[in-house]
Image (spheres, helix red, strand yellow):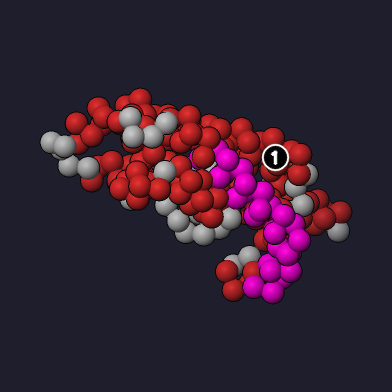
Amino acid sequence: MTEYLAQYGCGLLFLVVLLESTGMPLPGESLVVAGGLLAGEGTLNIFLVLGAAFGGSIAGDNIGYFVGRRYGRAIVVRWGERFGLGEKRFKMVEERFEDYGFVVVLVARFIIILRQLNGFVAGTMKMNWPVFFLYNSISAALWSLGYGGFAYLFGSAFQTYFAGHSTWPLYLVAAAICLIGCYGTYKFLFKVEDDDGPAEDAGSRHEA
C-alpha cells in the first residue's frame, strides 16, 4: 500500500478516501496513516496529505449525502427489511437524527462501516445540508489530523518500537474499539424509549 502511495502520490489518497466515503469498502484510513508516515520520511508533503484526506472525505460524504437524499428512502423501503431495517426501525433512526444527527455525523468518520455510510444515511434522513456540511467538515478535519498528523509526528517512533515487538495487541485494541463503537451506535439509533409504557398501562388499569 505504501509503495503505491509513494508512486502515485496524494491523488491516489484523495481518490481512495473519496470512494470509501461514498460507501465502498476501501482502506482510506490506512492510506491516510501511510501518507503521514511517508510525509514523516520526506517522501510526501504533509500538507498535501492532510488536504487530500480532508478533501476526499468532504467530497465523498457529500456525494453520499445527495445520493441518499434522492434515492435513500426508496432503497430502504425496497431492501431495508432484508438487512433488519424495516419501517419501524427506519422511523427510530429518523427520530434520532432529528435530535442528535450532528453527533452521529461527528463521530461516524472514526468508526468503520459508519464512516462509509455516514453521508448516505444523513441524506436519507433528510438532515439539513448546511448542518451536515458543517459538522462533517469538523469531523473530516479531526480525522485527517488525527490519523495523518499522528503518523507524521510519531510514525517513525512506532515503527522502531514495533520492529522488535509483536503488533497483534495493537490490532486487538483497534478491533475492540471498532466493535464497541458499532455496538454503541446501534444501541443509540435503535434504543426503544419505553419508560412511560408501564406507567401508562398501570394508569389505564386504575381508571378501569
The residue at the point 48 percent across, 52 percent down is 16
Residue 118 place in picture, x, y as percent:
60, 50
Please identify the residue farthest to the left as the structure is shown: 164
Image-based side of 132 in relation to 48, left or right: right
Image-based side of 86 in relation to 5, left or right: right
Q: In the rendered structure, which segment of residues is drawn in magenta?
A: 53-79
In the rendered view of the protein, which quadrant contains the C terminus?
bottom right
Say if 17 sits above or below 149 in the image: below
Please identify the residue farthest to the top as the structure is shown: 153
Say if 159 sits above or below 78 in the image: above
Image-based side of 194 in relation to 164, left or right: right
Q: Say if the magenta span includes residue 60.
A: yes
The residue at the point 42 percent across, 43 percent down is 9
The residue at the point 69 percent across, 74 percent down is 78
On the question of residue 47 being in view, the answer is yes
The residue at the point 61 percent across, 43 percent down is 58
Q: Residues within 10 Å of mark 1 (few under 14, many from 20)?
A: some
Q: Main secondary structure of the magenta part?
A: helix
Image-based side of 31 in relation to 204, left or right: left
Residue type pointed to by label 1: Phe
State which quadrant residue 133 falls in.
top right
Residue where numbered disc 1 is placed:
133
Residue 65 place in picture, x, y as percent:
69, 52
Residue 153 place in picture, x, y as percent:
35, 25
Residue 151 place in picture, x, y as percent:
36, 32
Q: Nearer the viewer, residue 131 or 148?
A: 148
On the question of residue 192 being in view, the answer is no
Please identify the residue farthest to the front as the structure is shown: 7
Q: Nearer the viewer, residue 60 or 46?
A: 46
